[in-house]
Amino acid sequence: MATVDKIRTGLIDKILSIKNKAFLEALDKLISSSKSESEIVELTNEQKAMLEMSENDIKMGKFISQDAMNKRNLEWLNAI
């Protein structure tokens, strides 16, 4: 069975020989999407605390709709 380095090198050689731009773009999209889905992101304690605070705000009804936020932002921008 091939090692990871041999597989990687073989793929690089094959990719370097491809001239079709659409194919390369599709391959790039495939690789990018599969990488992000397979990565496990570890959150810091601070990030976990912020998420818990957000959940509590939602439970307490301390939120506004996106439309209301957009209106508030436009009002703020117009006041500048």
Image (tube, helix red, strand yellow):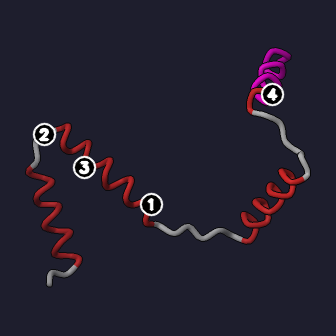
CA separation, marks 3 and 4?
40 Å
Residue at the image position 83 percent from the left and 25 percent from the top: 72
Q: Nearer the viewer, mark 1 or mark 2?
A: 1
> Which residue matches tag 4?
68
Q: Earlier in the sequence, mark 3 or mark 2?
A: 2
The location of residue 73, given as percent across then percent down, is 78, 26
Q: Earlier in the sequence, mark 2 or mark 4?
A: 2
Q: Nearer the viewer, residue 44 or 33?
A: 33
CA separation, marks 1 and 4?
32 Å
Q: Nearer the viewer, residue 9 or 22?
A: 22
Is residue 74 in the magenta section? Answer: yes
The location of residue 71, given as percent across then percent down, is 79, 22
Q: Residues within 10 Å of mark 1 (few under 14, many from 20)?
A: few
Say the numbered circle drawn on residue 27: 3
- For badge 3, the amino acid type reads Leu
Q: Nearer the viewer, mark 3 or mark 4?
A: 4
Residue at the image position 31 percent from the left and 55 percent from the top: 31
Q: Magenta stretch?
A: 69-80
Q: Is residue 57 left or right of residue 31?
A: right
